[in-house]
């Protein structure tokens, strides 16, 4: 699969102040969970320099449905959320992008 066909999901996480390090540690377990999902290609987390409670996840999927249906409607998503959600200040925002 080449980049032209993949979907890039960008998820923004707003983490409760004081929980940044715990969230960073939890991303390692979360990566192991999401990587088991059909259509998953890769994931990369980034921490904001100006706002240390803000994180982004760049997740590549083979198709939009691999994320929105295959992953989100699976037990893996429940496990993913259980790992990361204790540190959320607010619900994450996820949008999907095509390469142009």
Image (cartoon, rainbow, N blue to C red):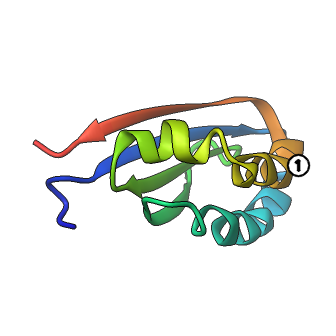
Q: Identify which residue, 92 or 67, lies in the foreground.
A: 67
Q: Identify which residue, 46 or 35, lies in the foreground.
A: 35
Indicate the quadrant containing the N terminus: top left, top right, bottom left or bottom right.
bottom left
For residue 91, above or below residue 76: above
Q: Residue 32: where, in percent of width, then height?
A: 67, 72
Identified at 62% across, 40% down, the residue is 72
Identified at 81% across, 62% down, the residue is 21
Indicate the quadrant containing the C terminus: top left, top right, bottom left or bottom right.
top left
Disc 1 secondary structure class: loop
Res 96 → quadrant: top left
Q: Identify which residue, 28 or 1, lies in the foreground.
A: 1
- Which residue corresponds to mark 1? 18
Q: Residue 18: where, in percent of width, then height?
A: 88, 49
Mark 1 residue crowding within 10 angstroms, few (<14) / some (14–19) / many (20+):
few
For residue 68, above or below residue 27: above
Q: Is residue 38 left or right of residue 41?
A: right
Q: Residue 68: where, in percent of width, then height?
A: 51, 36
């Amino acid at each position: 699969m080449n980049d032209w066909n993949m979907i890039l999901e960008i998820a923004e996480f707003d983490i409760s102040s004081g929980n940044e390090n715990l969230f960073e540690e939890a991303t390692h377990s979360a990566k192991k969970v999401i990587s088991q999902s059909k259509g998953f290609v890769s994931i990369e987390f980034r921490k904001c320099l100006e706002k240390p409670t803000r994180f982004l996840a760049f997740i590549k999927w083979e198709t939009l449905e691999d994320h929105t249906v295959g992953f989100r409607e699976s037990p893996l998503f429940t496990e993913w959320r259980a790992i990361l959600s204790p540190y959320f200040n607010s619900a994450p925002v996820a949008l999907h992008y095509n390469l142009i």
